[in-house]
Image (cartoon, rainbow, N blue to C red):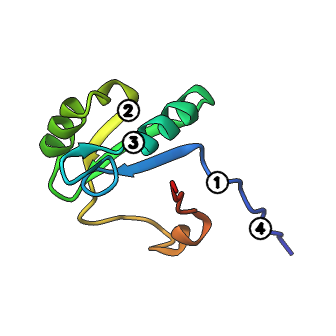
Amino acid sequence: MKVKRELPPPRVIAVDVDGTLHIRGEPNIRAIEWLKVRKAEGFTLMLWSMRGEAHARLISGQMGCADLFDVIVSKPGYILDDEGWGWIRRTQVARIT
């Protein structure tokens, strides 16, 4: 019988734009500072927005933090994964309080 080994969560953080990177047009300083620490710790930072890549790039530039992100993309409209959404149960939501 083959034992399935649980993998640690990938060191990738996906960050939403509206309501997360900025709140009502103002930079979310706490989130940005938290992300700077994670970046220094070696995490890959991915910025995404349901409004699309161009919006994510525009806002991150306006917030002065575009250089923090390794990847800037649209949120996916579709996924192609052998686990479907099953992989999501191994992810965590970071709450910046």
Kindly identify which residue carries mark 2: 69
* 19 lies left or right of 25: right
Query: Are the residues flagged by discs 3 and 2 in contact, CB closer than 8 Å?
Result: yes
> Which residue is drawn at the image coordinates 53% and 62% (left, top)?
93
What secondary structure is marked by label 1? Answer: loop
Q: CA distance from mark 1 to mark 2?
A: 19 Å
Pointer 4 or 3: first along the chain: 4
Residue 55, image x, y percentages: 14, 45
The residue wearing badge 3 is 46
Mark 4: amino acid: Lys
* The one of 89 and 31 positioned closer to us in this rendering: 31
Element assignment for label 4: loop
Please tell me whether mark 2 sits on a helix, a strand or a loop. loop
| Front position among marks 4 and 1 | 1
- Which residue bears the numbered disc 4? 4
**N-term-proximal mark, 1 vs 2:** 1
Q: Nearer the viewer, mark 4 or mark 2?
A: 2
Q: Residue at x 57, y 62 (%)?
A: 91
Distance (Cα) linking label 4 and label 1: 15 Å
Residue 77 appears at what percent x and percent y? 23, 64
Q: Quadrant of the N terminus?
A: bottom right
- Counting residues from the N terminus, which is met first, the one under dot 4 or under dot 2? 4
